[in-house]
Image: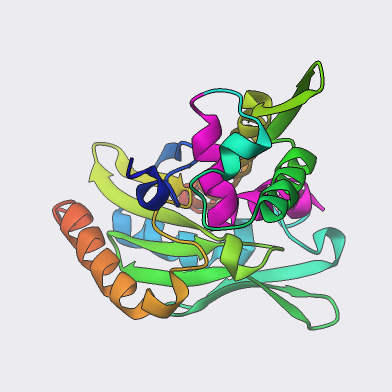
Amino acid sequence: MTAKTAGVAAFQVPPVEKSILVPCDPARAFQAFTAEIAAWWPLKTHSVGQDRAQTVCIEPRVGGRVFETADDGSTCDWGRILAWSPPSGFSMTWHPGRTPGTEQVVELSFISEAGGTRVRLVHRGWEALGEKAQPTRDSYDNGWDAVFVQRFGAYLQRG
Amino acid sequence: MAYRKNAAQFDALGDGARREILEKLRAGPRAVGEIAAGMTISRPAVSQHLKVLKESGLVAETRAGTRHYFSVAPEGIGELRAYLDGLWGDALIAFARHVAQEQEP
């Protein structure tokens, strides 16, 4: 039985996948999703601070923070940017209100299609992360970035 | 605290030993001794992890005579997925509304 080694991180909740079509090009969709997230994110219902949450910010670079700011100026991390490839997509760890050891991964892709841009979201479980991921974070980032670019690079806007 | 509603389940899954236990339970109900067999952690540690899993709703405990069996609670996993589904559904709809607003003349 190899379950002892192979089974350690094997249990996972199936990924949650969502997509929506928006009437603009991928560059605009990417910009609206990231730089303007504070303008549309439903903070009252989806935040750590709820009524006290004032704004949310995505720092536009690998390693950047995704965090909310409360009315007293304190901040609370939701995650970190793992891959950043505008306008085709980005990914981040996700652990709002929890410790980084309980993080998952959220991937966003912005794909040009008839009528606008298909925004696709995949929220994955713990198959590649967890408490053991921390020491190998750098190599993980690089590996993941390569996968991300490979996977979504072909979908870069067709002008 | 919408984000904290399912925190116990996320925290429960955030530990490698607990994921290993869940993986074992996928095959069917197991007693503590059976779960602990082959694991590198002690039996009391396994019991502690089972307690956390049970409190999070991801694992259920049943009794047959004097024996206690633990099994995966599908409703717990379902709750977690439903929560994420709702979160991202709300977020994407709000995002699309934001983009659509500026398209209007």
Task: Name the residue nearer the viewer: A101 or A124.
Answer: A101
| Placement of B44 over or under B36, stated as above or below | below
Q: Residue at x 39, y 57 (%)?
A: A128
| Placement of B98 over or under A78, stated as above or below | above
Q: In this image, A68 relative to A90: left or right?
A: right
Q: Residue at x 63, y 56 (%)?
A: B42
Q: In this image, A90 relative to B66: left or right?
A: left
- Residue A28, how many percent across, how many down? 37, 60
Q: Is residue B23 magenta?
A: yes
The C terminus of chain A, quarter of image: bottom left
The quadrant in which residue B87 appears is: top right
Q: Is residue B29 magenta?
A: no
Instruction: Give the overall secondary structure of the magenta segment.
Output: helix
Q: Is residue B89 visible?
A: no
- Residue A15, how many percent across, how many down? 45, 40
* Magenta-tinted stretch: B1-27
Q: Residue at x 67, y 37 (%)?
A: B32
